[in-house]
């Protein structure tokens, strides 16, 4: 059973529309590839928290990007099964320890033609580790309170000039959460009425290490966080 503080999230997920999260919705012809991410909530030392991963820093495409665990949906899988499997493969999360309690609308990543479903989960006692060092640099269990703290909110500017909502996370609050994932968190919190007033003129450039490297060929299974970054301005 999920805790009382998650009830607004469960209700909000059943009410929110894709258009409230992004202007990108999957094409009606069903041509988009299916993907899923796990938006896992847990209980930490400071109350509710959200599980996030930081992409490996030595990847040639968008190293260091922060995201939810996730990837492609395999044939015969549901989005829930895919989200749990990917979390197991990336951070060693035991699927049996997770209580699923909803999903957000399917969202579209135009650059890769992925239709991504964020699956909502609750785990009272999270046990995780970096299971795939090729993909994951760090695991962040971020207190909801830190995500709501106005001093940790910024507008993130990509070198190309476009900006989007972001959060400063990590022990030193020097890790940038933005793009597809940051947009989902920001707009879901807006919908729930959780967002606190913050200085939207506060601008932070995307760290250099997060835009270094040349694009690499797309892989069949893994959702490319770079796609999320490219789409962040309008999500």
Image (tube, grey):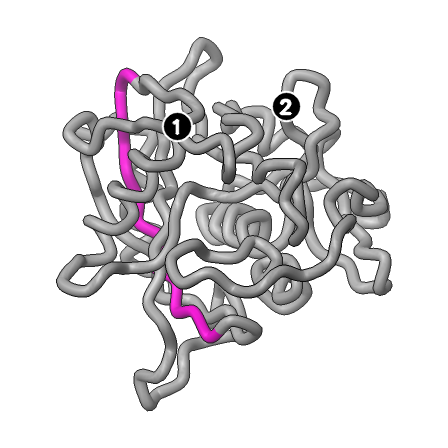
In the image, residue 145 lies in the stretch drawn in magenta? no
Image quarter hosting the C terminus: bottom right
Residue 60's disc is: none
Q: Residue at x 66, y 38 (%)?
A: 58
In the image, residue 117 lies in the stretch drawn in magenta? yes
Mark closest to the chain's N terminus, 1 or 2: 1
Residue 131's disc is: 1
- Of residues 217 and 51, the one drawn nearer to the viewer in this rendering: 217
Q: Residue at x 85, y 49 (%)?
A: 201
Would you identify the image quadrant in which residue 15 lies? bottom left
Q: Residue at x 35, y 84 (%)?
A: 31
Look at the image and give the residue range highlighted in magenta. 113-125
Judged left or right of residue 82, residue 48 is right
Image quarter hosting the N terminus: top left
The x and y percentages for residue 60 are: 67, 50
Residue designated by label 2: 170
- Of residues 44 and 231, the one drawn nearer to the viewer in this rendering: 231
The x and y percentages for residue 218 are: 52, 64
Q: Distance between the Cα atoms at labels 1 and 2? A: 19 Å
Magenta stretch prevailing secondary structure = strand
Secondary structure of the residue carrying numbered label 2? loop
**Few, some or many C-alpha atoms within 10 Å of disc 1 (few <14, some 14-19, many ≥20)?**
some
Judged left or right of residue 177, residue 204 is right
> What is the tally of numbered marks visible in this picture?
2
The x and y percentages for residue 73 are: 28, 59
Which numbered mark, 1 or 2, is in the foreground of this view?
1
Q: Residue lying farthest bottom?
A: 29
């Amino acid at each position: 059973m999920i805790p009382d503080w998650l009830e607004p999230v469960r209700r909000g997920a059943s009410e929110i529309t894709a258009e409230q999260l992004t202007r990108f919705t999957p094409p009606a012809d069903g041509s988009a590839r299916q993907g899923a991410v796990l938006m896992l909530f847990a209980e930490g030392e400071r109350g509710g928290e959200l599980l996030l991963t930081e992409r490996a820093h030595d990847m040639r495409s968008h190293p260091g990007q922060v995201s939810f665990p996730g990837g492609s949906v395999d044939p015969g899988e549901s989005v829930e099964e895919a989200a749990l499997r990917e979390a197991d493969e990336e951070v060693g999360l035991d699927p049996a320890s997770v209580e699923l309690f909803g999903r957000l609308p399917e969202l579209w990543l135009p650059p890769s033609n992925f239709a991504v479903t964020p699956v909502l989960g609750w785990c009272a006692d999270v046990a995780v580790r970096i299971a795939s060092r090729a993909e994951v640099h760090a695991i962040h269990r971020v207190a909801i309170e830190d995500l709501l703290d106005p001093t940790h909110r910024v507008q993130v500017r990509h070198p190309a000039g476009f900006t989007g909502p972001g959060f400063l996370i990590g022990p030193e609050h020097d890790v940038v959460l933005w793009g597809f994932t940051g947009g989902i968190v920001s707009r879901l919190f807006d919908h729930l009425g959780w967002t606190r007033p913050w200085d939207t003129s506060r601008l932070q450039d995307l760290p250099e290490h997060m835009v270094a490297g040349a694009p690499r060929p797309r892989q069949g299974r893994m959702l490319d966080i770079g796609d999320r970054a490219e789409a962040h301005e309008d999500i």
